[in-house]
Amino acid sequence: MMLAVASVGPSNSMKILVTGSGGQVGQDLIRGLLERGHEVHGSDVASRPSALGVDASRLPWHHLDVTDLTGLRKLIARERPDIVYHLAAILSARGEENPGLTYRVNQGGVYNVLEACREHRVSQVLFASTIAVFGPGLPDPVPNDVPLQPTTMYGVTKVGGELLGEYYNKRYGLDFRAVRFPGLISATLPGGGTSDYAPLMYVEAIRKGAYEAFCRADTRIPLMYMPDGIRALIELSEAPREQLTRTTYNIAAFSPTAEAIAAAVARAVPGAELTFNSDPTRQAILDSWPNALDDAHARADWGWSPEFDLERMTADLVPKIRALLNAS
Ligand code: SER
């Protein structure tokens, strides 16, 4: 039987469920989807973040543990979303502290989401993949379709998520789409990621006037400002299916060294002291990731293009962090 597929376009209001809504991506994604006129339902194992700044009447919030397939089925059967954005995951650094839990939440979670969405004929599933699917020894920049040999449990489970989504697409016709996010920088802090040194340089420089980064000064990984990341997810969702040549896309913005980020922060926050003290475990993860990604397929298939480079991001982000800190 064919799936009943609602068309997802910029002008159509959809009912959308976001897993992992309380996380770094979720909070900004929710605001972006509401601005576009969608009906959005948040879900997380945690309660609604107080700093979300969205009126509770505009954002129903559901307690959801993605390892609980029964609970997930019930929620999807009751709410009948058109689209599910699956963000819930344990990030790379925290993941290495408890690989078993990371496997259950990330790998079990994506299986459960795909299975519940298939059963209840959800039109589309968006998945947050990552640069952590890549391992060492790849060309620079890294093309879309290369051998995936990650060194972290987080990366392994994200490869698994990409492959499962591809399987559900081919086997059941589920419209699964994924972006491989670079390290994301925003005023909302991530939790437990290895790319956290980048957003922390901004937040701690403004909050405390100093930050000691846990990486070497010459560390260079792909990074992106959150508004571009959110736009990428939403634009991929809205792209006509027939234009897409694959289910998972590299997206790229900029790849400064940690030292170059520190210099940009110091220019915007005079007097801030940024230093480096490499932590071996997290440095090894950073060194296993690519320097830069080739996003030619995203550009060709759905018109992807980033708006922010390091300088533009810094100019936009610093006042936002200041306003948030003053309000709290
Ligand atoms: N930002 C993530 C992490 O550091 C990578 O996707 O774990």
Image (tube, rainbow, N blue to C red):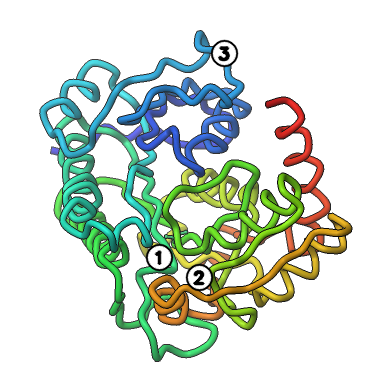
Q: Amino acid at mark 3?
A: Asp
Name the element at disc 2: helix
Quadrant position of ligand 1 = bottom left
The quadrant of the picture occupied by the N terminus is top left
3D distance between C-alphas at marks 3 and 2: 38 Å
- From the viewer's perspective, is the residue at label 2 or at label 1 nearer? 2
3D distance between C-alphas at marks 2 and 1: 8 Å
Name the residue rendered at 80%, 59% in the picture: 272
3D distance between C-alphas at marks 3 and 1: 39 Å
User: Which badge, 2 or 1, comes first in the chain's sequence?
Assistant: 1
Q: Position of residue 8 (x, y in %)?
A: 46, 36
Name the element at disc 3: loop
Crowding at dot 2, Cα within 10 Å, few <14 / some 14-19 / many 20+, comes out as: many
Name the residue rendered at 49%, 26% in the picture: 49
Q: Out of 122 and 4, give the one closest to the viewer.
A: 122
| Image-based side of 290 in relation to 305, left or right | left
Check residue 150 in the rendering and tell me which mark sits there, or answer none.
Answer: none
Q: Out of 103 and 133, give the one closest to the viewer.
A: 103
Which residue is the site of mark 2? 297
Q: Amino acid at mark 1?
A: Thr
Check residue 245 in the rendering and tell me which mark sits there, or answer none.
Answer: 1
Check residue 55 in the rendering and tell me which mark sits there, or answer none.
Answer: 3
Query: CB atoms at circles 2 and 1 under 8 Å apart?
Result: yes
Name the element at disc 1: loop
